[in-house]
Structure formats: C-alpha cells, structure tokens
C-alpha cells in the first residue's frame, strides 16, 4: 500500500517514531494508541498515518483483525471524506476489503473441507493455511491435520508442527505432553532443525509455567544450558511477544538477572519496554 500521508506534516513526536521504527510498525502503533485517540484526531494527515500503520500491522501480523481494522480506518476518515487524498485512500481500502472477504471465504471453505479425500500435497497446503490464521478454531483443526500428516508420512517435522500449533490453539496441556514426546524422539531420531524446535519448546514451557515461580526459573535455566539452542542464530526466547511477557514475569518474581537479559533484547529489537519494567529501570 502506498503511503497516503505527508510525512512532513505529522507531529514531531510521531515523525520521530516513524523514523526510528519504520521497519517495526507494531511499535509505532503502540505509541499512537498510547498518545493519540480517534476523538482527538482533527489532523487529517495524522488520521491517514494512524490508519496506514494500523493496516500495516493487521495485514502482516494480526491477520485475523484485518476486517475490524479496515472498519475502524473507514470510520476514522469519514470526517475528511471531501479530501481527494482521503478519497484515494478509501479506494485502496475497498481493494483490501475485497481481499479480506475472499480470505474469510477461503477459511470457511477450509474448515469444512474433506481433508482425508485430498492428496498429500493438498493436505499440506490446507494444514499450513489454517495454521497461519490466528483463529483458535483454525489452529486447532490445523493441529489435527498436522498429526494426520505425521501418521501418514512418519515425518517428524509434522509432529513438531502439530505440537506447536496445538499450543497456539489454546490446548496447552496437551501440547506439553506432545513436547515431552518430541524431546524423547530427538534422543534417537535425526532432525535438521532441533535447535529451533527446542527453542519453541523451552519458550512455550516458560509461558505455560509462568504462574509457578520455581518452574518458570527452571525452564529458563534449561533453555540457557540446552546445547541444541547453540545451533540457532537468534537469541532465546525467539518469539518477540515472549520478550515482553517474560520480562514482566521475571521482574514480578525478582529474577533480575533474567529481566536484565530480556530488557537488553527488547532494546536491541526496538520493542516497547513494559511500563512496570521501565519504571524499575528508571525510565
């Protein structure tokens, strides 16, 4: 999508955010949501910018929120509907709305498809497409399809996908059991990406046990001493969303060594530091 706004006319603080976080639009969106509200948005360029950033995040990260985001953008820009600049942007929105409708229809079709009647290639496509959705119903079905693919092919890759997709579908306890099986299988079976899989397992275990102080610490230490993680190019916990939540939990439990490391990674990745953590570190 082309930039619909004139960058030079944006407020100075917003221009600074855009310059520093251009490649991380979710950071910009978090700033805008904290400092600006729709009812205060009399600046047309700011309204266009807000809508543009929100749509960028929705179409690249929060894909299941696209429809709602497009509605919000349209409502935000209604007061400026006489502007040619806004009219042009609304035309772009219409294209996105059509694409979103097709995507929704496609997901509805996948949810009712006769999976067992498909050939292997089609089964893979359906499982991955469903797993890409943030919708828990889609993910739960994708997990079952990955399990079927594993049973059909005996390819461990599909069992790993089954376990992680199961966790993201909300079936966390069942995923923990599947992770235990993967750890056992890794002792005897060759697999090219053990480091990435083990990083996911350790991170999900920390998330699962974040209400239990000692277990949370135990799984952090297990991850930091796991030789498989030395094969991975990125730093634990990998998933950026966990950086924020683990920083908050480690501060709450008084695990300041863990919190220090996570805050360093948050800064390195230009991610917002949670307010309580920021306050502890003095700003």
Image: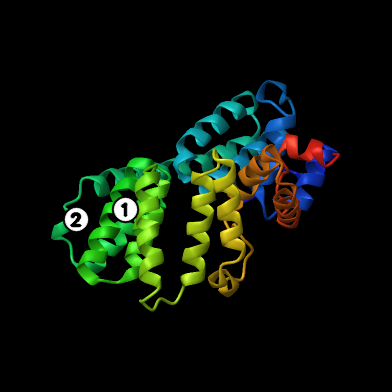
Position of 192 relative to 43 (above/below): below
Question: Which dot marks residue 143?
Answer: 1
Front position in the image: 51 or 108: 108
Residue pictured at 34% horizontal, 57% vertical: 162
Total marks in image: 2
Q: Residue 209: x and y, percent?
A: 51, 44
Residue of label 2: 115
Position of 95 relative to 124 (above/below): above
Going from N to C along the chain, the mark reached first, 1 or 2, is: 2
Q: Residue 97: x and y, percent?
A: 44, 40
Dot 1: element: helix
In the image, farthest residue toward the front: 214
Front position in the image: 89 or 163: 163
Question: Which dot marks residue 118?
Answer: none
Cα distance between the residues tagged 1 and 2 = 13 Å
Q: Residue 114: x and y, percent?
A: 16, 52
Residue 101 in which image quadrant: top left
Q: Is residue 42 left or right of residue 68?
A: right
Dot 2: element: helix
Q: Is residue 218 visible?
A: yes
Q: Characterize the local packing of mark 2: few (<14), some (14-19) or many (20 or more) Cα atoms within 10 angstroms.
A: some
Residue pictured at 76% horizontal, 55% vertical: 264
Q: Is residue 37 left or right of residue 137?
A: right
Closer to viewer: mark 1 or mark 2: 1
Residue pictured at 56% horizontal, 67% vertical: 226
The C terminus sits in image quarter: top right
Q: Residue 164: x and y, percent?
A: 41, 55
Residue pictured at 37% horizontal, 51% vertical: 175
Front position in the image: 164 or 106: 164
């Amino acid at each position: 999508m082309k930039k619909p706004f004139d960058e030079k006319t944006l407020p100075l603080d917003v221009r600074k955010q855009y310059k520093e976080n251009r490649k991380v639009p979710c950071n910009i969106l978090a700033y805008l949501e904290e400092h600006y509200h729709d009812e205060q948005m009399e600046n047309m360029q700011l309204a266009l910018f807000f809508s543009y950033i929100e749509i960028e995040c929705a179409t690249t990260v929060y894909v299941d929120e696209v429809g709602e985001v497009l509605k919000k953008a349209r409502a935000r820009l209604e007061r400026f509907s006489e502007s040619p600049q806004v009219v042009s942007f609304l035309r772009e929105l219409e294209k996105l709305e059509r694409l979103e409708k097709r995507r929704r229809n496609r997901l509805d079709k996948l949810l009712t498809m006769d999976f067992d009647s498909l050939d292997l290639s089609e089964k893979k496509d359906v499982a991955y497409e469903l797993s890409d959705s943030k919708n828990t119903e889609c993910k739960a079905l994708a997990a079952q399809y990955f399990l079927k693919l594993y049973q059909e092919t005996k390819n461990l890759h599909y069992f790993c996908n089954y376990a992680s997709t199961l966790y993201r579908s909300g079936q966390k306890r069942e995923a923990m059991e599947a992770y235990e099986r993967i750890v056992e299988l890794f002792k005897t079976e060759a697999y090219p990406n053990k480091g990435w899989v083990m990083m996911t397992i350790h991170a999900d275990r920390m998330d699962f046990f974040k209400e239990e102080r000692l277990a949370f610490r135990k799984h952090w230490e297990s991850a930091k001493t796991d030789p498989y993680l030395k094969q991975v190019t990125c730093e634990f916990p990998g998933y950026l969303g966990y950086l924020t939540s683990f920083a908050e939990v480690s501060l709450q439990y008084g695990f300041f060594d863990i919190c220090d490391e996570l805050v360093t990674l948050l800064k390195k990745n230009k991610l917002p530091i949670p307010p309580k953590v920021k306050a502890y570190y003095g700003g």
